Image: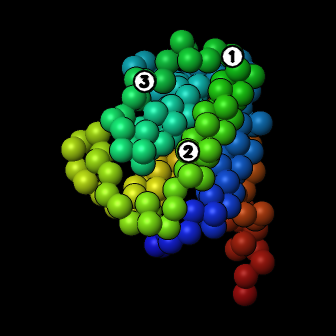
Amino acid sequence: MQINNIESFLGYYSKIKNRTQRLFEYIPHDKIEWTYQRGKFTIGDIIRHLANIERYMYAETVQFKPSRYNGCGVEYAKGSKEVKAYYEQMNEESMKIFAQLSAEDLQKKCKTPGGIEITIWKWLRAMVEHEVHHRGQLYLYLGMLHVKTPPIFGLTSEEVISNSD
């Protein structure tokens, strides 16, 4: 997918973000800081990570600024309600920055935290992949907690099989 127009990209990305946010409603409030293994991201860490990396890495670098990402601990937001609100707040800030990108800007190169130059539209595409990757982690974590989660596009795998020839 090539991104030539920021408005159409932001519409698409908003749908990606909404599917992630929809999953938040299934997280038991008392499990927001749960993890399957000590030293690994908690559910809250994943959500804060998505919020902070979008705002402080992706949104900074498309402005030709260095990354300001500094982790995803409870110091950013603690508790289920606060973590969800923080995710929304960081996304709002990021979207305002992304909305300023012109078609010409999308063709420019920015520098990643690893020092690699990448075309901005490709960097934005990587941001989508990053979001989806961590949404998958949330599905897995909730599965480990035996929480029934919604299908992404309306049907479960089993429902697709039963509706197939």
* Label placed on residue 107: none
Q: Residue furthest left?
A: 115
Residues at badges 1 and 3 in contact (C-beta under 8 Å)?
A: no
- Residue 90 in percent (x, y) is at 61, 33
What residue sits right under mark 1 in the picture? Answer: 79
Q: Earlier in the sequence, mark 1 or mark 3?
A: 3
Front position in the image: 36 or 116: 116
- Which label sits in the foreground, 2 or 3? 2
- Residue 16 in percent (x, y) is at 64, 55
**Mark 1 residue crowding within 10 angstroms, few (<14) / some (14–19) / many (20+):** some
Q: Left or right: where does residue 52 sit relative to residue 143?
A: left
**Mark 3 residue crowding within 10 angstroms, few (<14) / some (14–19) / many (20+):** some
Amino acid marked by disc 2 = Ile
Real-space Cα separation, disc 1 to disc 3, in angstroms = 17 Å
Amino acid marked by disc 1 = Gly
- Residue 80 in percent (x, y) is at 71, 22
* Label placed on residue 97: 2
Q: Left or right: where does residue 125 sit relative to residue 112?
A: right
Q: Can residue 29 be spotted in the picture?
A: yes
Q: Residue at x 36, y 38 (%)?
A: 65
Q: Residue at x 59, y 25 (%)?
A: 44
Q: Residue at x 36, y 44 (%)?
A: 64
Q: Is residue 1 above or below residue 137?
A: below
Q: Coloured how?
A: rainbow
Residues at badges 2 and 3 in contact (C-beta under 8 Å)?
A: no
What residue sits right under mark 3 in the picture? Answer: 71
Q: Earlier in the sequence, mark 2 or mark 1?
A: 1
Q: Earlier in the sequence, mark 2 or mark 3?
A: 3
